[in-house]
Amino acid sequence: MSLVVVGSVAYDGVQTPHGQRERMLGGACTYVALAASYFTEVGVVGVVGEDFDPADRRFLEERGIDLAGLQQKPGKTFYWSGVYSEDMNDRVTLRTELNVFADFRPELPPEYRRRPYLFLGNIQPELQRSVRRQMESPRLVGGDTMNYWIENRREELLAALADWGVLLINDSEARLLSGERNLRRAAERIRGLGPRVVVIKRGEYGAALFCDHGAFLAPAYPLDTVSDPTGAGDCFAGGFFGYLAEQGADPSAGGIEPRLLRRAVIYGSVMGSFCCERFGVERFRTLTRAEIDARFQEFKELTEF
Ligand code: AMP
């Protein structure tokens, strides 16, 4: 069932121990949409500048992604660049040029407003709320955030979170948001703020799910080479939410089935792992659903005992 994704569409410059790219397609919305497109119909809400390459537009359309909500404005596309540490667990941002993203006012095409699933990528919480308000009655709303909003727009973020069903967040941000060091306690605190489902992403250490039925822990897929981790968290979100949308997950009437949520975590991990295999969105040029399902099976074998 259809999913609407909002967030940044960008050009990224990235340097890792395995190479460097000056300018490649990126942005949180792009990664979420690409990963989710293997599971469900996806429509994006974002903004790009006049420099947005028609070939990038075609690539997204060829993955079946609906770009009716992608505005093109005078000016340049959002640009971000960063450099990763030797072990790739840390990265330093070199440049953030908001460009057309600075005045982004998300506007949903009328046909998006009745769609059942909404994923709010990491943007200013007030904009996330404005998108949420434009939707008529979504079945499930999920979102992401980051330390900047937790520290600088806390009240706005708390107001936004209050009507989300799912929050995906990384471990340091979960601690910052909740004020709790222990992840289980952090998750419980956050669940008290609105989202009944909290997924804490832990990079190469996997992910932890907390919901009404308890906790579930999944490792990260042990890749032999990580080329570029940019977008892995967003691809996790796209796989997780895309799978829930594909399955028609419904939080009313007793909450989403725990089995669906657990499988969604594994699909999230699978999509995050594929993302890291190549630079930027490259892996999605050839990736197939059959490869995704094969890695899902492999996860079962890796964790069964
Ligand atoms: P991740 O590696 O999952 O954190 O996602 C990286 C993506 O986030 C890159 O493609 C960037 O273009 C995008 N990004 C970086 N900084 C921001 C920001 N301040 N707001 C929105 N998107 C951003």
Image (spheres, rainbow, N blue to C red):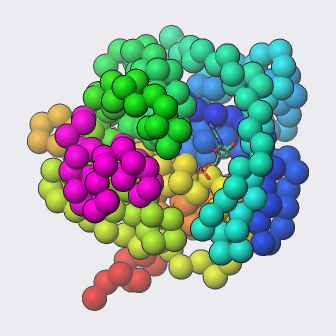
- Which part of the image, by quadrant, shows the C terminus? bottom left
Name which quarter of the figure residue 83 lies in: bottom right
In the displayed structure image, the side of residue 147 where residue 76 appears, left or right? right
Of residues 140 and 145, the one drawn nearer to the viewer in this rendering: 145
Can residue 299 be seen in the rendering of this structure? Answer: yes
Residue 65 position (above or below residue 159): below
Q: Position of residue 74 (x, y in %)?
A: 83, 15
Residue 73 position (above or below residue 44): above
In the displayed structure image, the side of residue 59 where residue 3 appears, left or right? left
State yes or no: residue 180 in magenta.
yes
Name which quarter of the figure residue 170 lies in: bottom left
Of residues 59 and 141, the one drawn nearer to the viewer in this rendering: 141
Q: Which residues are magenta?
A: 167-194
Of residues 243 and 7, the one drawn nearer to the viewer in this rendering: 7
Residue shown at 51%/11% (left/top)? 110
Q: Position of residue 66 (x, y in %)?
A: 62, 29
Quadrant for ligand 1?
Answer: top right
Which residue extends farthest left? 254
Which residue extends farthest bottom? 305
Q: Position of residue 165 (x, y in %)?
A: 29, 37
Residue shown at 17%/59% (left/top)? 214
Residue shown at 41%/73% (left/top)? 219
State yes or no: residue 196 in magenta.
no
In the displayed structure image, the side of residue 150 where residue 274 appears, left or right? right
- Which part of the image, by quadrant, shows the N terminus? top left
Q: Main secondary structure of the magenta part?
A: helix
Which residue extends farthest top? 110
Q: Position of residue 181 (x, y in %)?
A: 31, 59
Residue shown at 39%/63% (left/top)? 207
